[in-house]
Image: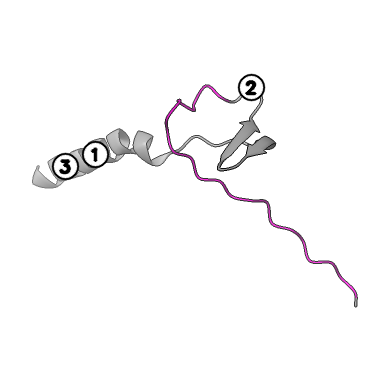
Amino acid sequence: MKKTICVLILVMATVFTAGNILAASGKCKIVKVEGTRMEIDCGERTQSFQEGNKIKIKTEKQKAAEGC
């Protein structure tokens, strides 16, 4: 009985915290840069982004040019 309750509590904790772990993502293009501000265009996928939220920006990796 105790094992079942422990498993149930762990499953519930995982389900409730999974929403915080999954972050919004999207592919965006830089439209304009002015000093420390940058304007990006993410197309239609902006519903999961809120004004004032922090975002993490990763650049696309460049493939190495082969040859000499």
Whole-angstrom CA distance, mark 1 to mark 3, is 14 Å
Instruction: Check disc 2: other Cα within 10 Å, few if <14, some if 14-19, many if 20+.
Output: few
Magenta-drawn stretch, dominant element (helix, strand or loop): loop
Q: Is residue 59 above or below residue 8?
A: below
Q: Is 66 left, or right, of 3 in this rendering?
A: right
Residue name at image x 56 percent, y 46 percent: 57
Hey, which quadrant is residue 8 in on the image?
A: top left
Checking the image for residue 44, the label placed there is 2
Checking the image for residue 2, the label placed there is none
Q: Is disc 3 placed on a helix, strand or loop?
A: helix
The magenta stretch is 46-67
Q: Is 67 left, or right, of 15 in this rendering?
A: right
Q: Is residue 64 above or below residue 22?
A: below
Question: Could you tell me which quadrant the C terminus lies in?
Answer: bottom right
What residue would you read off at disc 1? 13
Q: Residue furthest left?
A: 2
Depth check: give the residue in front, 62 or 30: 30
What residue would you read off at disc 3? 4
* Of pointers 1 and 3, the one earlier in the residue sequence: 3
Give residue 10's position: percent from left, percent from top. Answer: 22, 43
